[in-house]
Image: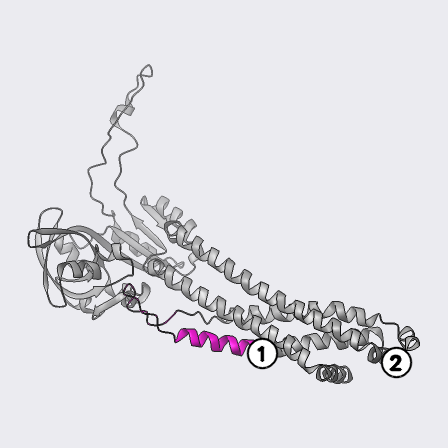
Amino acid sequence: MKLLVDIAITLLRAKLKQSIVAAVGVMFSIAMFVTLLGFMNGLNDLLDGLILNRTPHIRLYNEVQPSPLQPIDLATDTACRNFISSVKPKDELPRLRNAIAIMDVLEQDPRVLAVSPKLVAQALFNVGTVELNGVVNGIDVNDEIQYYRYTDYLVKGEPYALASGNNTIVLGKGLADLMKADIGDLVQVTTAAGDRTMLRVVGMFQSGIADFDKVQCYANIKTVQKLLARPGSYYTDINLKLLDLTQAPAMAKELAARFGVDAVDIQTANAQFETGSDVRNIISYAVGIVLLIVAGFGIYNILNMMIYEKLDAIAILKATGFSGGDVRRIFLLLSVIIGIVGGATGLLAGFGMQSLIDRIPFVTAALPTITTFPVDYSVKYYVIAVTFALATTWVAGWFPARKASQVDPVEIIRGK
């Protein structure tokens, strides 16, 4: 084998320019594959994260809706058919019954990572004679910071200000701009029941979705319970983070039937985002694979030319005792060496291009916490690139190597 490697390297040196061109082709393909996948998936993570980072894996809630069984349906007269129009929803609060007991059970479930209560309140913000619509989300601040990346979207204020203070609120950036409110200002909030409260602004939140930021606000869950004059056990939502995200659809159905509540999983709630990510991933992989295949054709052409130019050397090798299998291994080694050299340099070039993109300033008013273009440095892209590149170069080298192994030395020597 050592002798075969020496011969392969000698042939490479004899055609050094062509070998370098082939290796550069592989290098360029791998570098572009790694860079493209890293950038596209970094962009996917950024776009999907605008919603998905703030979305629980499963949300339990109580949907207020008309009763499916109306009193008139209890009539026993089968000769008549009942028609009911304009059926009104049941007169009940949107709270979850036995919310604390449900949370205690879920915290013992080995599939659940975190259980977070939430209280959503519709409100009006009074600015002089103008009333602005808003939604105040009562949250467990510690859970939001740990599991829902709350601090990534906080553009002003301290993350734990809501947890440590009463009658405080974090306004959406769009709503704060409309009210010209800043840290420390007091804003007047009117609930749906007509109660008015003054809340102190301790932060501003910006998700990157303008319509969302003009409505959504955050407060300590106890502040919202006090705002609505509800007891400490009053919650409208229970949010779950799971250890395995893929279990969310099945588990949502299970919990809905078990506790008699409505449940929605993250895949169902955000199917459009996953579809967009899948399409962008397919495009990225397709472009990268095409680049690697093109590099493979380059290696194939160079080895084919090398065989025609080295027929004399091949004939001498076979005449001096080298078998067809040995000749085939020599040319396969040529291809693999080109693939390894091109692959190694391609990984370095790809990492360098990713780092360069990661340092390019990316300034947008919608996402003030993002300062550079997003890049995903996942190792899997490097592994896929190297594996596919080596496979491509091996296949590209196999056919010329097979042709070289079938050369008849007698005919070559007789022709000379």
Which numbered disc, 1 or 2, marks the residue that appears first in the sequence? 2
Work out which residue is located at the far left of the displayed protein and give it: 128
Quarter of the image containing the C terminus? bottom right
Image position, residue 320 (x, y; %): 88, 82
The answer to whether residue 178 of the structure is visible from this angle is yes
User: Which stretch is magenta?
Assistant: 344-373
- 4 sits to left or right of 336: right
Image quadrant where residue 181 sits:
bottom left
Residue 367 part of the magenta segment: yes
Give the camera-side residue of 104 and 202: 202
Give the camera-side residue of 100 and 29: 29
Image quadrant where residue 398 sits:
bottom right
Mark 2 surroundings within 10 Å by alpha-carbon count, few (fewer than 14), some (14 through 19), many (20 or more): few
Residue 343 sits above or below residue 56 on the image: below
Q: Are marks 1 and 2 in contact (CB under 8 Å)?
A: no
Q: Residue at x 53, y 68 (%)?
A: 33
Residue on which the image places disc 2: 321
Image quadrant where residue 311 sits:
bottom right
Residue on which the image places disc 1: 344
Residue 345 part of the magenta segment: yes
Quarter of the image containing the N terminus? bottom right
Q: Residue at x 61, y 73 (%)?
A: 25
The answer to whether residue 267 of the structure is visible from this angle is no
What's the CA distance linking mark 1 and mark 2? 35 Å
Image position, residue 408 (x, y; %): 88, 72
Callout count: 2
Q: Residue at x 24, y 58 (%)?
A: 213
Residue 306 sits above or below residue 149 on the image: below
- 111 sits to left or right of 154: right
Type of amino acid at the residue the image marks with label 1 = Ala
The circle on residue 96 is: none
Image position, residue 131 (x, y; %): 11, 51
